[in-house]
Amino acid sequence: MTIRTVGFVGLGMMGSRMAPQISGAGWPVHVFDINGEAAEAVARAHNNIFVEESPKAVAEAAEAVITMLPAGPDVHTAALGPDGLAQGFSEGDVLIDMSSSQPWMTLELAEALKVRGIGMIEAPVSGGIEGAEAGTLTLMIGGDDELVERCMPILEPMAGHVFRTGKSGSGHALKTLNNMLSALNTMAAAEILLIGTRFGLDPEVMVDVINQSTGMNSAMQRNMKQQVISRKFSGGFAWDLKFKDFGIAVDLAKRTETSVPLSALAFQLSQAATTWMGDTTDKRSIEIVRWMEHMAGTEIRKPG
Ligand code: NAD
């Protein structure tokens, strides 16, 4: 069955850039955000986007609804809460959760919807705001093959790379594990740059050498010169979201009874860093390095 109308719940940093990719490809998109202005702004800026007053109203208007919310609990509220999607869906409709949600909550929600005759798949993303803007996100799709096939036409306008990860929950598990590794990469890169800087090495030279050597990782390639040595500490992923994903991955380790002492320690250090960063609203994920500099009593700067 071809999907003719789409719903989109969550028009934040990512959703506000993803929904217009779908409307731009020809689907009418019915949107809702608890921040009404966020939804209105997207509808004002793009054709074929219609603001609805609740998730229920979105589900009544659409055959497939995408959620792009902070995490699993928000998706549960939007789906099963008062005036939620479940109250507006008709049998055969489908929910596509593109948020970075807790995999076990995805399984619970998929079950709760299944008994109502509603399908659910997940398609969390990497590629950040730039990827959302350009329609080049990497999608990690978990769920029933037939449902995925049916949803692909509305997912493709947002995607650069598409990976099938397996059954329901698998996409969310892989997404959170990627973000755990990304957090570990940043902390490991910062530690070695701190040692080198205190010894008197030029950290820029260190980054250049390591990026041609076996110590290279994503933080060395993308962040250390650009954000840390330049002292910009701006842009990139929000710390709160990265910390949330790290916590989901540590929880997943516990649920799978996997021993992960390195990751558990790094998560605890990240918890301390979160407290140190305080309650500012715009904390970027690279701020963890500033906390590590504080602990080491050294800034990662070019000498002289
Ligand atoms: P965001 O906080 O900017 O946006 C979330 C939006 O959801 C907000 O507009 C908020 O008002 C709305 N919202 C919250 N609860 C709601 C509810 N119950 N009903 C309706 N609307 C609700 O977050 P974001 O940066 O857009 O990220 C969304 C998801 O994508 C997160 O899971 C995040 O981890 C993931 N992600 C983000 C990035 C990134 O670079 N920002 C990259 C990859 C994945």
Image: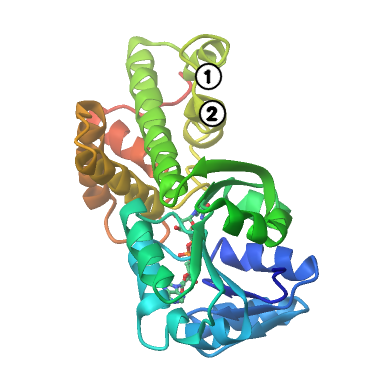
Colour mapping: rainbow
Residue at (49, 14) in percent of width and height: 206
- Mark 1 lies on residue: 204
Q: Earlier in the sequence, mark 2 or mark 1?
A: 1
Left-right relation of 254 to 205: left
Quadrant of the rendered structure where residue 66 is?
bottom right
Q: Can you give x and y, in whole percent of width and height, for residue 53 in the image? A: 53, 90
The amino acid type found where label 1 is placed reads Glu
The amino acid type found where label 2 is placed reads Lys
Where is 2 relative to 223, above or below?
Answer: below
Left-right relation of 105 to 57: left
> In the structure shown, which secondary structural element does the residue marked by tag 2 occupy?
helix
Q: How many marks?
A: 2
Q: Can you give x and y, in whole percent of width and height, for residue 96 in the image? A: 53, 63
Quadrant of the rendered structure where residue 25 is?
bottom right
Where is 76 relative to 288, above or below?
Answer: below
> From mark 2 to mark 1, how far is it between C-alphas?
7 Å
Disc on res. 225: 2
Disc on res. 188: none
Confirm or deny contact between disc 2 and disc 1 (CB under 8 A).
Answer: yes
Residue at (19, 29) in percent of width and height: 259
